[in-house]
Image: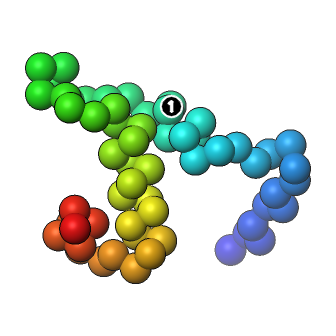
Amino acid sequence: MPSPALVTDGDRRSLFVALEVIEDPRDPRGRRYPLVSVLAAAVCAALAGACTFAAVSD
């Protein structure tokens, strides 16, 4: 197993910048919130200990 690469100051990006590259597969008519915001909230919930979809949505 290769060792993880070191992260330098030039390699760090904000969470929103990293998530913006993900294409939104949702139908435009059903969108209430930008995908970046939904994914960022899910990441924060997971970091806070949410283990299920129900916990993330809470």
How packed mark 1 is, by other alpha carbons closer than 10 Å (few <14, some 14-19, many 20 or more), is few
Question: For this view, does 43 lie left or right of residue 14?
Answer: left
The quadrant of the rendering that contains the C terminus is bottom left
Question: For this view, does 15 lie left or right of residue 45?
Answer: right
Task: Reply above or below: 42 against 23.
Answer: below
Residue name at image x 17 percent, y 70 percent: 54
Q: Nearer the viewer, residue 30 or 11?
A: 30
Q: Provide the residue designation for mark 1.
A: 21
Residue name at image x 75 percent, y 67 percent: 4
Q: At numbered mark 1, what does the secondary structure look like: helix, strand or loop? A: loop
Residue name at image x 28 percent, y 34 percent: 33
Q: Quadrant of residue 46?
A: bottom left
The quadrant of the rendering that contains the N terminus is bottom right
- Image coordinates of residue 9 in percent, x first then y, are 87, 50
Colour logic: rainbow
Which amino acid does the dot numbered 1 rest on? Val
- Image coordinates of residue 2 in percent, x first then y, are 73, 69
Task: Reply above or below: 40 against 29.
Answer: below
- Image coordinates of residue 31 in percent, x first then y, are 19, 29
Residue name at image x 39 percent, y 54 percent: 41
Q: Residue furthest right?
A: 9
